[in-house]
Amino acid sequence: MDFIVIDTEGRRELKEIAIIDRHGRLIYEAFNQAHNEHFRKSAAHKPLKTILMDFRAIAIGKLLVFHNAEHDLAVLAKSFERVNLPVPNYPKTYCTYREAKQQIVSSRYSLEYLAKKLNLKVDGRYFNCEQAHIARYDALFTHKLYLALQHMNLASTTVNPFGSSRVDNPFQTHPDNTNVYQ
């Protein structure tokens, strides 16, 4: 299934959003024009309503991946309510925070900690805590984390074709497992 990775910044209202496609490319980034502290000349400043309508159009029919889905979805819901738009029903979401808690034994599950623990890199660089909480930066690392968790999940469900093989003597024969050649 096609997926997008979303990171939001803000508490009561969306201040910044970044969306990464399944290939790890930034496909959307916007800053709420009501929050001037995020002003950058090259950044896309838009009204909150426009940002939310863009998000809704991009998200249709896709799996939505977040690092802390509960927080990001709450920010989005408050923002939709603030501009009097109906809150969309997101039928398919994935939370890397929640999934990491199930797959990785640790006492911490922040994006920074998991990125460092799993040696994740974006553009050849490890996670830098000074760039954390910038939507684009966090979304790119969440994408890498999502792929790593998917790989870990796949590896844990793959059956070792030699798991039940046993050689009692050098002259014993075993049928070849065709899966190995594939």
Image (spheres, rainbow, N blue to C red):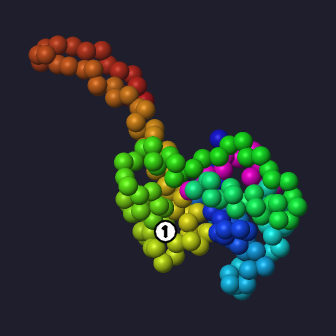
Q: Quadrant of residue 92?
A: top right
List the residue tagged with mark 1. 123
Q: Where does the magenta region start and end?
A: 57-67
Q: Which residue occupies 17% across, 13% down?
A: 172
Q: Which quadrant is home to the C terminus?
A: top left
Which residue sits furthest front?
12
Please tell me how crowded label 1 is: few (under 14), some (14-19), or many (20+) other residues with Cα within 10 Å: few
Q: Which quadrant is home to the N terminus?
A: top right
* Residue 100: % across, % down: 46, 49
Q: Is residue 103 above or below residue 35?
A: above
Q: Nearer the viewer, residue 176 or 116?
A: 116
Q: Which residue occupies 83% across, 73% down?
A: 47
* Residue 121: % across, % down: 44, 64
The reply to whether residue 166 is visible in this rendering is: yes
Q: Is residue 20 left or right of residue 141?
A: right
Residue 63 among magenta residues = yes
The reply to whether residue 115 is visible in this rendering is: no
Q: Is residue 65 left or right of residue 157?
A: right
